[in-house]
Image (spheres, helix red, strand yellow):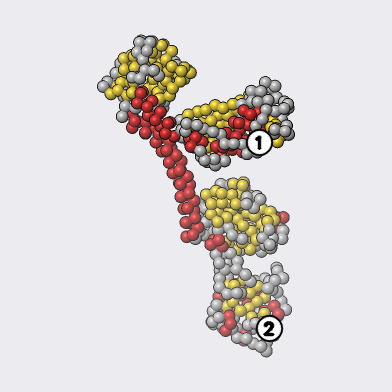
Amino acid sequence: MSVNKILVNNNDSNYTHSIFDISEYTGNSYSTLSDALDDIPQAKHKGGMTIRYVPTDDNKYVQFRYVGTSTANADFTNVANWQGVDDVPIAGSKNLVKSGGVAKEIGDENIYGFYLSVINTLIADEDWGVSDYIPYTQGSNVNWHYGGAAKSEAYLVTYNSNKTKISGFRAKEQDGRTLLSSKSEFNNCSYIRASFRIHTENPYVTIGSSRIDFNKSLKDKIQIENLAIEKNAEEIKIENLAIEKNAEEIKKVELLTKGTIFSNFGGYLDNSGNVVINDEWGYTDFIPFIASTTVIWNYGGDAFLDAKLVTYDANKNKLSTFGANKKDSRTLSGSRYEFENCAYIRFSFRIKNTSASITYDDDTISVANGLNYRVNVLESIVPKQFTIPACESYPLWEPTSTTSNYETVNVRGQAQCSLSYNAFLAKYYDVYIGENNGIVVRKNTIGLDASGQYSIYEYDFIPKHYNRTLLLSAGMDPEELPGIFGVAYFIKSLFDGSVDDGLDYFRKNVRIKVIPIIDA
């Protein structure tokens, strides 16, 4: 029988819209439902009827519906046969609602992967969830069971009727907290939202005698799984970056099998494995070493003890060295101690020695092939001329006077740009710090200038896969503004979308270290 079918007694003032008002009928309030039922006369018992009365401890009506059909006093006064009726849906309540139906489970609206902070913001954390707004009844104690260890950053937050934050409680104890209604945080409170641990078996809150469980819906579970997938995607991305980094090494190994060495020119390797600048020498990249084989090191020309062949372990840590102590070449037995635990070698060679090579038994790897390969690649991607794009609104002219500012002037001697040292760096360099278009930019302090007043800064522009390093500097004297602005506009052209084959080569292949102003 529906509520609409309950007998309407238009002649009985105790019925209001088919609801029997016990307090109106008797003039009493009641401490329990059982007491109220006892005051309903047998003659008014109806199956499916709805009643209301005023509780002794509250001046607000409560409402119940009889779910039975028997009018016998024993059945009618049994509170187990009565179901509460709420004004509005209450999270976790199994009561009927005056608008019809049963209150929706609050768990359907939970958010997973976050907790509430002290300032009522959602903070990402895959181990936590946040409930929807839960109606709060004034004077009700709250048992907040979030589960697990304390977390001072996670909160239960209280709100007024407009859902504006009032205050909050932190998860500062193991598993949960009991929050008394007398706490000031509950003043004017109409709603609460609670943080809880997702992996706790059954997190919940109780408001008075009503319990609200944070049950996960299928949608919520999918959301949690998606968080795990996103995290895994980041790990895959990192792995892919490592794979890309190794791709060049793989390419080098493949070229080695074809008798090619990637080489560098303009220096030789010393006894520490460091590069010593020298126009007549070059040195190779890391070459995989074949254990226990005889090595013929062909560097060419007269003996030069300073130039070395260096051995390395599997982690590319230096082990030992051989010097170029004979004319043209040396034959090195693979059984020598210098090759113990050797996984790679690098060797120095004279650039003019067109037959410079390394031989493992009968397998000769030529430096000349590597040189030709590198020259061909550079000629194919580096233009014959490279021009820095014209400056937009700051033509570069020698300054008419030296000041503590960085200033350009036009042909009439009128200043067009005047910047302090730090403002100059902020305008032309600091704006790129971080990652921009695949280039990581860092700012480093390398000491003070000659005056001892200003820090000298180095800006490091690092592409993901670079094979050259270039150092640029300007401003040895403060008056040298064309150089200072010239370097600044060259860097600007790397990031402003300028279309140029030369710029593209620098963006992808060259690590650039810039000291914008040496003497501030």
Label 1: element kind = loop
Residue 298 location, x and y as percent?
A: 34, 17
Instruction: Give the Cα separation between the discs numbered 2 and 1.
Output: 90 Å
- Tell me the quarter of the image containing the N terminus: bottom right
Q: Residue furthest bottom?
A: 11
Figure check: 201 above or below 137 = above
Residue in the picture at 53% in, 54% down: 112
- Residue at image coords 47%, 31%: 384
Q: Which mark is residue 14?
A: 2
Q: x, y percentage for residue 443? A: 59, 32
Which residue is rendered at x = 68% and y = 56% of the image? Answer: 165
Query: Which amino acid does the dot numbered 2 rest on?
Result: Asn
Graded by Cα atoms within 10 Å as few (under 14), some (14 to 19) or many (20 or more), the crowding at tag 1 reads some
Residue 10 lies in what quarter of the image?
bottom right
Q: Is residue 208 visible?
A: no
| Residue in the foreground of this view, choosing between 181 and 28 | 181
